[in-house]
Image: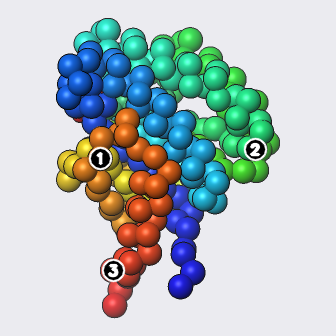
Amino acid sequence: MNTVIPAHVGIIMDGNGRWAQKRSLVRTQGHLEGLKAAKRVVKAASDIGIKYLTLYTFSTENWKRTAEEVGFIMGLIKQYLRSEMEFSIKNKIRVRHAGDFTGLPSDIQKEISDTILETAKFDGMQVILAINYGGRDEIIRTIRRLVKNHPDMENISEDEISANLDNPDIPDPDLIIRSAGEYRTSNFLLWESAYSELYISDKLWPEWEKQDLEDAITEYNKRNRRYGGL
Ligand code: FPP
């Protein structure tokens, strides 16, 4: 049997805190290891031939964490964008953003927009960093955009909403993965995940390797996608 590679995979990278706690380390240490796992999985996804990989990096709800933890994650995002540029160039990886860009600190905004610009022409895998992202927030921002430009909101269609999301050209995720065993989607790609297959693994995010992504794809291949049909 030929393995079908899902075109778009979304990942809820959960369990950094628990990974640290298990080792009596501070939570930020878990995020540091989480960043290493993200790098491993991006490389694996690119090798496997996934076309779009969305990483739930920082949610609109994550601002509720301590200033120290928020600052640390923002620092990691910066570090990721800088340190992976060489890898992106070599592997033709295009980096994009999903979420409320204007709500991000200006230094992070600059880092993200520089990376987007520098990788815009690459035709390899696209890595979408969901930063300051919330599914409901994306829908609200989409409606606000539509209200401004759409003459006939009363008759708005599904396609028109899809066409005004943060990244309308990106197909809906085929597979959504969540690490660390929690059975919820936590406001991730709310509109886009209507027919996504869900894969939940008990493994904590910092422990993720290429094999874990391959296991998820193997499981995905056992699913029978019906999109509400028979
Ligand atoms: C969830 O673990 C993880 C986050 C909220 C942050 C994700 C950030 C990274 C993996 C590092 C940056 C990555 C990139 C790609 C720039 P948690 O803290 O909720 O864990 P817990 O549920 O065990 O407490």
Q: Left or right of 107: which side holds 152?
A: left
Q: Which quarter holds ligand 1?
A: top left
Other-residue count near label 1 (Cα within 10 Å), few / some / many at <14 / 14–19 / ≥20:
some
Query: Disc 3 beta carbon < 8 A from ligand 1?
Result: no
Q: Secondary structure at mark 3?
A: loop
> Image point 64% across, 54% down: which residue?
47
Name the residue at the top extreme.
68
> Image point 48% across, 14% down: which residue?
75
User: How many marks on residues?
Assistant: 3
Q: In the image, residue 59 lies at what x, y percent?
A: 35, 32
Distance between the Cα atoms at labels 2 and 1? 30 Å
Q: In the image, residue 175 lies at what x, y percent?
A: 42, 61
Q: Left or right of 116: which side holds 200?
A: left
Distance between the Cα atoms at labels 3 and 1? 30 Å
Residue at the disc numbered 3: 228
Q: Is residue 200 above or below residue 221?
A: above
Q: Earlier in the sequence, mark 3 or mark 1?
A: 1
Residue at the disc numbered 1: 203
Residue at the disc numbered 2: 92
Q: In the image, residue 105 lies at what x, y percent?
A: 48, 13
> Image point 50% across, 51% down: which residue?
210
Distance between the Cα atoms at labels 2 and 3? 36 Å
Q: Which mark is residue 41?
A: none
Query: Disc 2 beta carbon < 8 A from ligand 1?
Result: no
Q: Secondary structure at mark 2?
A: loop
- Identify residue type, mark 2: Lys
Q: In the image, residue 50 lies at what x, y percent?
A: 59, 58
